[in-house]
Amino acid sequence: MNYVHITTDGQPEYPYNLWQLRKAHPNISFPAEPTPEDLVPFNVFPVTINPQPDGYDHRLQAVEQLPPVLEENGWEINWALRDTTPEEQARYDAAHAPEPQWMGFGIELAANPAISELYDNIPTALANGLSIGLAEASKGDTRLFVGLWQRVLSVGGISPELLQQIAAMAQQYALPAEFIASLLPANTET
């Protein structure tokens, strides 16, 4: 059960619990489960927590608990909606983003004839390193792949169309935005 304690200056103290009541009155023996009538002399009252609102955009609005108020049927807790901050929206987006599908991206790359041709035209060690780097990227460490990919980009020979196609595949498979940005030369946008 939830309780509110009305302090000597008339302010509601919430949340409040029976442990606090017993600590404040160590010489009084309270029943294990006191009734509301048992608590009235100590200015402690049960609180009803009303249901939170629903049907709102969780990305753009947040629910906040309001202080307890004395209503016709006793003390109640209500809720209010407020606009979320840009930081809260970013956290929401991160928490609700689709899971990156690295395996699907890797399979799509391997099945693409233009990528196979690209791998045939770069040194074997570099091609193998990109494959290993992609496996490491799937575990969260993109440094090897990005570093080697930047080497491939610096040599040239990759058409802008192929770069856009690779970036589009990465987006399709919900790969991280910073990884997608690293696939393109600095002056190119997706």
Image (spheres, grey):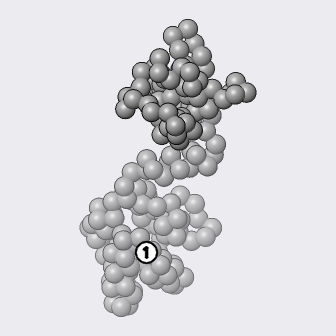
Residue 69 drawn above or below residue 57: above
Q: Please tell me how many numbered marks the rendered image carries.
A: 1
Q: Which residue does the image show at 51% across and 10% down from the upper left?
A: 73
Query: Which picture quadrant has residue 85?
Result: top right
Residue that appears at 50% across and 23% down: 39
Tell me where residue 144 appears, x and y as whole percent: 44, 81
Neighbour class for label 1 at 10 Å: few (<14), some, many (≥20)?
few
Name the residue rendered at 60%, 20% in the picture: 69
Towards the viewer: 18 or 175: 18
Give SS at disc 1: loop
Residue 157 in sight in this render: no
Question: Would residue 118 appear left or right of 179 to someone viewing this image?
Answer: left
Quadrant of the snapshot with the N terminus: top left
User: Residue 115 location in percent, x, y?
Assistant: 35, 73
Is 16 situated left or right of 132 in this image? right
Tell me which amino acid carries mark 1: Asp
Whether 182 is drawn above or below 98: the answer is below
Q: Front-most of 43 and 160?
A: 43
Residue indicated by mark 1: 141
Residue 184 showing in the rendered view? yes
* Residue nearest the observer in this picture, 122 or 93: 93
Left or right: residue 135 compared with residue 52? left
| Residue 156 placement (x, y as % from top left) | 51, 80
Q: Residue furthest top?
A: 72
Q: Residue furthest front?
A: 27
Q: Is residue 161 above or below residue 89?
A: below
Give the residue drawn at x 33%, y 85%.
128
Q: Residue 103 is drawn in which quadrant?
A: bottom left
Horizontal and vertical percent position of residue 155: 51, 84
